[in-house]
Image (tube, grey):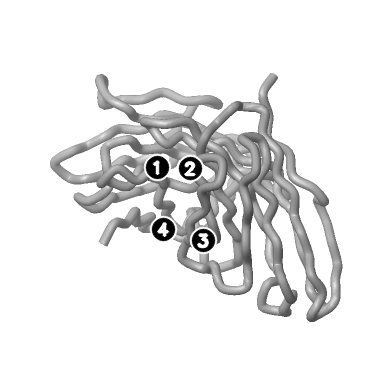
Amino acid sequence: DAEITQSPRHKITETGRQVTLACHQTWNHNNMFWYRQDLGHGLRLIHYSYGVQDTNKGEVSDGYSVSRSNTEDLPLTLESAASSQTSVYFCASSGRVYGELFFGEGSRLTVL
Amino acid sequence: AQSVTQLDSQVPVFEEAPVELRCNYSSSVSVYLFWYVQYPNQGLQLLLKYLSGSTLVKGINGFEAEFNKSQTSFHLRKPSVHISDTAEYFCAGKTQGGSEKLVFGKGTKLTVNP
């Protein structure tokens, strides 16, 4: 079965360190998205990609970057982690037309 | 603005009671509408979707939703809830204008009590 996997599932890091969260999908979807989920804010879009070499900023992109070198992967990098980036991060993918999203299980990041 | 509004942030109900979780969407959101469920410490999974056709849509776990274009609503219902339905529920709609993005409501926490 096709799926979308995230790693690591849990990570603790220190302020100022670079962190990369991996996302891999086997749906062969063109569209991939990164969200963060925080209490009281719901899901907020960080970055998204509509295909290889395409990346776009979402509503909360400051301090984050992504790159898309193939269809399957969209890693999310925090260049210099801050305590405000402590959150649960979800990767998702979708095909064209309807926009139905398929989500990973999430990565819980704690920045101390 | 393109938006989806979930009118209740928390809904407590007793087991076997009916429940309705309300969702309204703005006119700038397309009529591709979705409900997702998130169980504790898990990702979001699709509960049901409306793409076209019959306005009553049935999903998994006995849930259904009714698309109402005149009221721009897409409310989620279940006639009899179980303890296991305790979760957070998100309404979402595809944005208009060629975007491939979904816009999400802020979620409704459903708590089913014995």
The kind of secondary structure element at disc 4 is loop
Chain letter behind tag 2: A
- Which quarter shows the C terminus of chain A? bottom right
Q: Badge 4 sits on which subunit?
A: B
Q: Amino acid at mark 1?
A: Glu
| Residue in the picture at 62% in, 47% down | A68
Task: Report whether A6 appears left or right of A47.
Answer: right
**What is the crowding at mark 3: few (fewer than 14 residues within 10 Å), some, or many (at least 20)?**
many
Q: CA distance from mark 1 to mark 2?
A: 8 Å
Whether A79 is drawn above or below B86: the answer is below
Q: Residue at x 51, y 48 (%)?
A: A54
Task: Give the alpha-carbon distance from disc 2 to disc 3, as whole Å.
Answer: 18 Å
Secondary structure at numbered mark 3: strand
Q: Which residue is mark 4?
A: B8
Q: Pointer 3 indicates a residue of which chain? A: A
How far apart, in angstroms, are the residues tagged by discs 1 and 3?
Answer: 15 Å
Give whichever of B51, B5 is nearer the camera. Answer: B51
Disc number lying in front (1 or 2): 2
- Mark nearer the N terminus (2 vs 3): 3
Between tags 1 and 3, which lies in front?
Answer: 1
The amino acid at mark 4 is: Asp
Which residue, given by chain and number where applicable, does mark 2 sit on? A50
Label 4: how many Cα within 10 Å (few below 14, some 14–19, many 20+): some
Mark 4–mark 3 distance (CA, rounded to whole Å): 19 Å
Could one spot residue B37 in this view of the protein? no
Q: Earlier in the sequence, mark 1 or mark 4?
A: 4
Choose mark 2 or mark 3, whichever is in front: 2
Residue B100 marker: 1
Q: Can residue A70 be seen by looking at this rendering? A: yes
